Image (cartoon, helix red, strand yellow):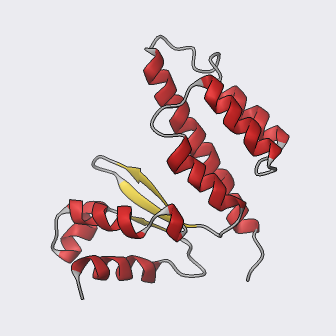
Amino acid sequence: MKLSDSIESFIKTMLTQDEPEVELKRNELAEYFGCAPSQINYVLATRFTIDDGYVIESRRGGGGYIRIVRVVHSGAQKLIFLIQERIGEQISEAESGRLIGQLVNERLITASEGMLMRAAVSAEALSVPIPAPMKDAQRAKLLKSMLTVIARQNRERAPET
């Protein structure tokens, strides 16, 4: 069995029906498998994609972690696709407004959630003295975080199949 297959199998074993989310430390996992952390990154990037039904959250640094969340194929799937593909590293206030409007129209989020999200990513909320690209990057992070929470809630409310 190839190393990538072993790492994938190990992680999927940890993700069970009762535990659809797991937090791991990249360096500890690399040490366990005797490989470079980049090998762990490769497995996550290629075997735990949104198309496979997973969302990866990552925090770097000494106390960093990788959180792998298995999502139910539902409205959550679309939310996660948007988080990873449409928002990107930066998003303008206008584009985030259009995206939030689309989510409300498609009933993937409620009107109240949409209003709160618009307020959180508004120019007023991000009126700190930093360059516009940094504000757009912060807006993207905020929007991704909010949509991840909503996707998780959708997964938890989804009926068992």
Q: Which residue is outermost to the top? A: 129
Q: Residue at x 55, y 30 (%)?
A: 139
Locate residue 151, reporting x and y percent: 66, 57
Residue 35 versus residue 27 in the image, above or below: below
The residue most toward the bottom is 1
Q: Residue at x 64, y 53 (%)?
A: 79
Locate residue 120, reporting x and y percent. Answer: 66, 29
Q: Is residue 12 left or right of residue 148?
A: left
The x, y position of residue 16, in whole percent, is 54, 81
Q: Is residue 32 above or below residue 101?
A: below
Residue 121 seen anywhere in this rendered image of the structure: no
User: Could you tell me which quadrant the C terminus lies in?
Assistant: bottom right
Residue 136, compared with residue 86, is above or below; it is above
Q: Residue at x 48, y 32 (%)?
A: 90
Residue 5 visible in the shown view: yes
Using residue 30 as the reference point, say whether residue 71 is left or right of it.
Answer: right
Percent x, y of residue 157: 76, 67
Q: Quadrant of the N terminus?
A: bottom left
Determine the image quadrant of residue 125.
top right
Q: Is residue 136 left or right of residue 79?
A: left
* Location of residue 74 by image quarter: bottom right
Q: Tell me: residue 124, above or below residue 27.
A: above
Closer to the camera in the image, 64 or 110: 110
For the point 22% across and 68% down, the residue is 30
Across the whole image, how many numbered discs are drawn on residues? 0
